[in-house]
Image (cartoon, rainbow, N blue to C red):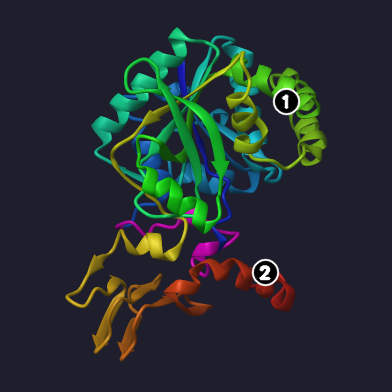
Amino acid sequence: MRYAMILAGGSGVRLWPMSRARQPKQLIPFLGGRSLLQVAADRLEGLVPAANRYICAAEKQRALILAGLPGWSSEQFLGEPMGRDTLNAVGFSAAVIAQSDPNAVIAVFTADHLIEPQDEFRRIVGEAFDLVESNPNTLATFGIAPVNAATGYGYLQLGEPLSGSARRVVRFQEKPDLETARNFLAAGPERYLWNSGMFVWRADTLLDCIRRYEPTIHAALMEIAAAWNGPGRLETLDRLYPQLKKISIDYAVMEPASRDDSMQVAAVPMPLQWLDVGSWPSFAETCERDDHGNALAAKSITLDASGNLLASSDPGHLLAAVGCEDLIVIHTPDATMVCRKDRAEDIKKLHALLGERFGAEYL
């Protein structure tokens, strides 16, 4: 059967100060009162049966996440004792689902994407399901046409055509330097696509790849899965999961699989409106703009100001900007941040400094 799993374990440090440990980015209701996770969950309507939908996220977020998703049961929430990157999250989910359905085909999505139109999204995902069901040794990913020379995304080098719109992936290039990213952009989307971080695969195929490429992780995941339906579920999970090597699915499986003659890695192009809301500049793309290009997500007033982002979690708080250009101004009840747009990536460094100076108080 077909399943869908949403990865919702990101910390969202580049969206500080709104994104906090107690309410990470995927749970912030900053999209007209809806969260990124709610939007991602709604996209699954009509794609797979409601009972076949799962979320993998931090166990400490269980109550908060399920409260925002009416109709989702506790068994559909796969709680990580601690984050161990994407390989372990998707491997854990596949191992648990395969316990009840050895023939499961799983689509993996993330909780920080905005994708439109949704009907076309579901059609493209259905194409990937068909491809994997017809070719069990296939790991499918979805590729996005690059619009700039981004160095924060992975790139898919495309090979020969497969069925439908799919293309063979001959190489993964994770987060290239700027010159390489510019070369990929210049080559065009017929040669290179961004790796969206969304996938479709058979659970048993993925788990076999983990067995061959990361055998220690595979052994632990199998032990967790074997205990899942018994009284030792939590003890086994809490004992083994924190010991797993922290590594991404791209480095651990997708890159070696693209070089493995026994595997077929496929890219299904997704020519849609796609936005990865992982930073304040990308969040600004979701906001209304005034005549001077200011992105506004707050009660605000500007004078001779242009190209700024003004956002507040307090609807009654007024933000005023005078003579400012290309700034990010974010207000919350206990912290306000001002940052130049071209330094947005350095918010991660600021977040680390906060922990050193103030402990967990503002994290």
Mark yes or no: residue 333 visible: yes
* Count of marks overlaid on the render: 2
Q: Main secondary structure of the magenta part?
A: loop
Query: Which quadrant of the figure has residue 137?
Result: top right
Residue ID at (24%, 31%)? 119
Give the residues drawn in magenta, as a range.
14-32
Front position in the image: 178 or 17: 178
Q: CA distance from mark 1 to mark 2?
A: 32 Å
Looking at numbered disc 2 in the image, what kind of residue is underneath it?
Ala
Residue ID at (49%, 78%)? 337
Q: Is residue 343 above or below residue 236?
A: below
Instruction: Please give the label number shown on residue 352.
Output: 2
Residue 70 x, y percent position in the rendering: 41, 38
Looking at numbered disc 1 in the image, what kind of residue is underneath it?
Tyr
The residue beneath circle 1 is: 213
**In which quadrant will I find the C terminus?**
bottom right
Residue 228 x, y percent position in the rendering: 70, 22
Residue 285 x, y percent position in the rendering: 31, 60
Mark yes or no: residue 109 visible: no
258 is within the stretch colored magenta: no
Q: Is residue 65 above or below residue 336?
A: above
Front position in the image: 268 or 178: 178
